Amino acid sequence: MDDIFNRLVTYLKDYNVYKITKLDLSLNENTIVLKESPEILNVYSISKSIISFGIGILYDRGLLKLDSKLTEILKDEINFEYVKKWDNVTIKSLLDQTPGYKSPKLMGLDKYKVDKDWLKYSLNLKLEYGIEKRFQYSNVSFYLLGRVIEKLSNTSVDEFFNKYLFSDLDFKGHAIGKSPLNHACGSTDMFFNSSDLAKFGVLYANDGIYNNKRILSHEWVELTYKTHSSEKLKEYTLGFWKDPASNEIYADGANGQYIFIFKGKGAIAIQSYDNLLKVENIIENCLRS
């Protein structure tokens, strides 16, 4: 992992990168600051991997299964007409981005141009394809999974992660963006620093254990490493991406936010603001060299 880290530091100097953090299983940290930045930054779609962790916590506690139906869980929240195909949508299909969408929704600033009730908006989207038949990346899936976390934990997403993630991993700073009706965006708009992102990666690299404490079950971590759906040459698995050549998983956010997870070794987190920094190039030039 040291060689990869050194290659990354050299490679990333040509981009608008703020920080690179390497953390091994013994929690030895090395952070390189390339440019000054705010204390915490929007990690965009890395938020999806955080939400996936939350679903894992509920799974480990027996509060849901991968084949649990979304509308059954949220039935008390659904007081409106909706597209009945949503009754077939499972937790797994949301985690794998395969409910049957035709196109992505709730993306970027467009999410603030739709009905302010994002649950009603989402459940009235047409599902053009069968469940688990077609991968379509969309922010809808993980907004809905955030609502599942709220419902089954009977608390806010903020309080849930304070209890099960931020405290145990000693996060130094965090913020969670909200929808117009004050639910977590889920798919995006969580704010962290690179050191805390690396801690999150180490949790998965160390089979769900952090600082000698088991936080996620071995079963859930193994499920996360299995490929569930794919897009072109990339594989997607429960809110993470997977490099098919190495079988390593990573979290990917817009504008160059990444957590690369090395099973049994540790993690490297990158925070930047550069839409030219592509994960395919990082993998090819730094991770596979």
Image: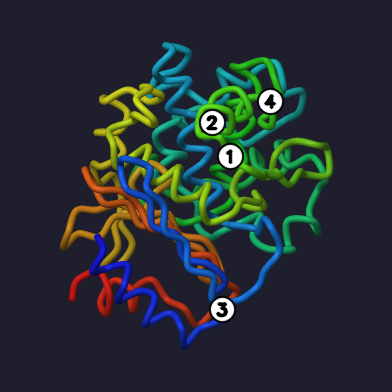
The Cα atoms of the two marked residues, 1 and 3, are separated by: 25 Å
The Cα atoms of the two marked residues, 4 and 3, are separated by: 31 Å
Q: Position of residue 117 (x, y in %)?
A: 79, 40
Say which amino acid is labelled 2: Leu
| Residue found 34% across the figure and 30% down from its top | 208
Residue linked to disc 2: 165
Q: Position of residue 100 (x, y in %)?
A: 45, 47
Foreground mark, 1 or 3? 1
Other residues around mark 1 within 10 Å, as few (<14) / some (14–19) / many (≥20): some
Quarter of the view holding residue 230: bottom left
The secondary element bearing badge 3 is classed as loop
| Residue found 59% across the figure and 54% down from its top | 193
N-term mark: 4 or 1: 4
N-term mark: 2 or 1: 2
The secondary element bearing badge 4 is classed as helix
Foreground mark, 2 or 1? 1
Residue linked to disc 4: 159
Quarter of the view holding residue 280: bottom left
Say which amino acid is labelled 3: Asp
Foreground mark, 2 or 3? 2
Say if mark 2 contacts mark 1, CB within 8 Å.
yes
Q: Nearer the viewer, residue 23 or 245?
A: 23
Say which amino acid is labelled 1: Phe
The secondary element bearing badge 2 is classed as helix
